[in-house]
Image (cartoon, rainbow, N blue to C red):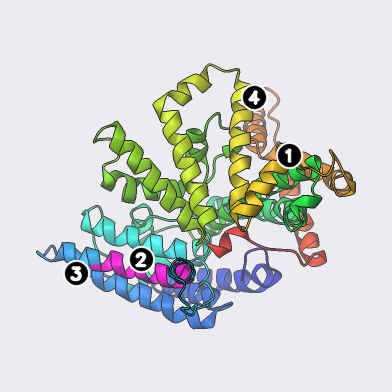
Amino acid sequence: MVFSNLVFLFCFLPIILLAYFISPKAIKNIILLIASLFFYAWGEPVYIFLMLFSIHMNYFLGRMIGKNTARKKAYLALAIIGNVAILGYFKYADFFITNVNRLFNTSLELTELPLPIGISFFTFQAMSYVIDVYRKQVEPQKNLISLALYISFFPQLVAGPIVRYNTINEQLMKRKVTLDKFSEGVRRFIIGLAKKVLLANAFGEVADGVFTSSTDDLSLATAWIGILAYTLQIYFDFSGYSDMAIGLGKMFGFDFLENFNFPYISLNVTEFWKRWHISLGAWFRDYVYIPLGGNRKGEAKTIRNLLIVWTITGFWHGASWTFMAWGFYYGVLITMERLGGANLLSRLWRPFQHLYLLLIVMIGWVFFRADDFTYSLSYLERMFGMGINGLMDSQSYIYLNDYWYIFALGILFSMPVLPYLKKKTSSIQKKKPFQVTFPWMSTAFYMLLMIASMLQLVNSTYNPFIYFRF
């Protein structure tokens, strides 16, 4: 089940909201836990047992670590090994088997197991909990229901953001939903839904059309249209999901940290990754980069740590050499910026800095989107004019004619336009003597977005979520 699904919007969510708000305080977490487990089991019922195993394993080992015995390091190692083993078996087993077969000319059978939805996200959340307990940053959770809700809570269960236990542990026990907070959650959810349904899906149709074509058939314009479409699709798809998750959390009284901050306005790669998938970057910084030594042990080891972390970051996204190359690519770029590249860039005219960043990111997205290196490299050749099938072709004319306004809206709203307008209207409201207010305009705006999203969902069958495969 996905958030941009009519069953979720008109059946699941209204029922859960009603059940939650009419139930007594003592069972609200139980209501949310039941809803979350049902939500997860909707598409893959058998994997509910994997979720329950993860919950009980981390609950038990967290309690053991928290007892502060001489064996707590061993319990932590067991927890990390257990979580990594779950993730490794279901997500990476076939990758390793395939490469062993190629390297040693063996014929080991693939597991061919379907990937449990959101396994990378809930596994990382569980690991952050046991590590924080070991570090004595939080107390071990003694209430199994509360820990189970933290790991399985449906708003951010399958595609993030990665919620750290130490940011919501108090909210698991005590939270309050006010009318203002609930309204804010509804507005945030509608914005995310519109990003996904009205923009990301449209860009996805274009990107899929281009990237499923042979590179021999691509013109220069079509290659750039395809990667621009994917660049905008992945942003509106993932940030839209994060907006919906944050909005849903607020409806139930939870405050999740932000996960995106208009990354495409960045001036360099380092800034880009401080704005893109913020929760993942923070996780790798606190649980991998800093334990490796961070930047505390000299320049050589700092570079080593950066390359390790970014290669792992790429591998986290998918069991493929192209994902690892994508991560290593960013590790190299961030290392270069650290060694003086950022200072050189800062001397350029700001528009040139933006263009540099966008070009670097779009090249990276080619490896992220393509299935293998051969296609990736061939696609990049077409982007830069090598072996192209002309400057433009019928395909590029069709996309420009049918989708030009979608591209215009996507580029516009990938910049902080809405926060700017909100700030402006807020300042106008405070001015005297006019006392101008715009409540009806705001309500009408969100109603129109919701209606437009519903109409699109009813009339379209194309509704993928990119990050569900992670």
Q: Name the one closer to the observer, 374 or 428.
A: 374
Q: Identify residue type, mark 2.
A: Val
Q: How far apart are marks 2 and 1 (CA)?
A: 43 Å
- Eye-nearest disc, 2 or 1: 1
66 to 56, vertically: above or below: above
Residue assigned mark 2: 84
Q: Position of residue 358 (x, y in %)?
A: 62, 35
Number of numbered discs: 4
Nearest to N terminus: mark 2 or mark 1 = 2
Q: How crowded is mark 4: few (under 14 residues within 10 Å), some or many (20 or more)?
A: few
Q: Identify residue type, mark 3.
A: Met
Please tell me whether mark 3 sits on a helix, a strand or a loop: helix
Residue assigned mark 3: 64
Q: Distance between the residues labelled 2 and 4?
A: 56 Å
Please tell me whether mark 1 sits on a helix, a strand or a loop: loop
393 to 6, vertically: above or below: above
Residue 71: which quarter of the image? bottom left
Residue assigned mark 1: 386
Q: In this view, does 259 lie to the left or right of 84?
A: right
Q: Distance between the residues labelled 2 and 3?
A: 19 Å
Range of residues picked out in magenta: 78-96
Q: Name the one closer to the observer, 256 or 25.
A: 256
- In the orientation shown, which residue stands out farthest toward the front? 105
Residue assigned mark 4: 431
- Eye-nearest disc, 2 or 3: 2
Nearest to N terminus: mark 1 or mark 4 = 1
Q: Distance between the residues labelled 3 and 4?
A: 58 Å
Q: Name the one closer to the observer, 424 or 292.
A: 292
Q: Identify residue type, mark 1.
A: Met
